[in-house]
Amino acid sequence: MENIPFKWRVSQIFGDKSSIEKIADQDKISSLEFDSTGNYIAVGDRGGRVILFQSNHVANESEEESDLDEEELMKEEEKEKNEENEEEEEEEEEKSKQKKSLQYKFYSEFQSHEPEFDYLKSIDIEEKINKIQWIKRRNRSHLLLSTNDQTIKLWKIFSKEKELVTEFNKERQEKESINNPKYLLFPKTQVEEISKEAYNKRTYGSAHAYNINSISLSSDDEVFISSDELRINLWHLERTDKSFNIVDLKPEDLEQLSEVITCSQFHPNESNQFIYSLSKGGHSFRRP
């Protein structure tokens, strides 16, 4: 049997097709990241914006309307493991999904970072998004971390309903007042539109003397690491006031510096293991 060569093809293009000369510097993409399910994409640009895209599979299933807490999710997982019939149905649904072409559409956009000025160092801090990290979804809202050169932010993206009053206690033509309380009725409301809102839950800053190049979340979604050229810090998601330095490559004399940290990443399954790479091509695997 002859080997058929594997060929890549373009499935979808985001944005307008234009020459590079016409693209503004702030519109250039600086970071992008899939979430753990692959149903959402986060794109960061040099203007400090984060743009989210949603797959058509999620839109068809109305996944975002499910508001399950952690206990309900655990119960659902147990049911799926114990009931073989449900697993077979899921496999068939998954096959039917694969037959459909996967497409992404615009979901939301928000301003993550603004340009700042460091008065101590007398330098400008760009708003450019260096890295985005999704947090596993537990309910209707989405959580993600984004960072520029100096500041890490935790964002919550959620749906907000705008309601309007559709019915009143009585017709406007009726001028007489209602004296009997039993005739008083609550006004009825109706959802006019659903918008996507972004809320900055926490800000982690003032922990790096050099520009941040990476952030990575642990497998248990409790802690994350952030790295610059010389140091790696460990953070707890609930604590913004303190971080722990776990790697320090800064020598006493900077002239003796021979290599710097270029990237860091947590192990996908073990929350106590991480790896980082160095500018000379080496890498180091760390654990307690």
Image (cartoon, rainbow, N blue to C red):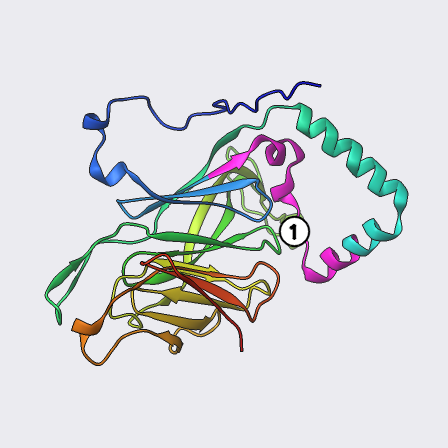
Q: Residue at x 62, y 33 (%)?
A: 57
Where, by quadrant of the figure, is residue 121 drawn? bottom left
User: Residue 74 magenta-drawn?
Assistant: yes
Please identify the residue farthest to the front as the structure is shown: 1
Quadrant (top left, top right, bottom left, bottom right) of the N terminus: top right
* Residue in view at x 28 percent, y 38 percent: 28
**Residue at disc 1, secondary structure:** loop
Give percent across and percent down for residue 174: 54, 36
The vertical placement of 273 against 186, above or below, is below
**Residue 39, image x, y percentages:** 57, 40
Which x, y percent locates residue 11? 50, 24
**Predominant SS of the magenta segment:** helix
Residue bearing the label numbered 1 = 67
What amino acid type is highlighted by mark number 1?
Asp
In the image, residue 127 above or below residue 246: above
The residue sitting at the left extreme is 122
Q: Is residue 23 magenta?
A: no
In the image, residue 130 above or below residue 6: below
Give the left or right position of residue 70, taking residue 287 as reference.
right
Q: Residue furthest bottom?
A: 252
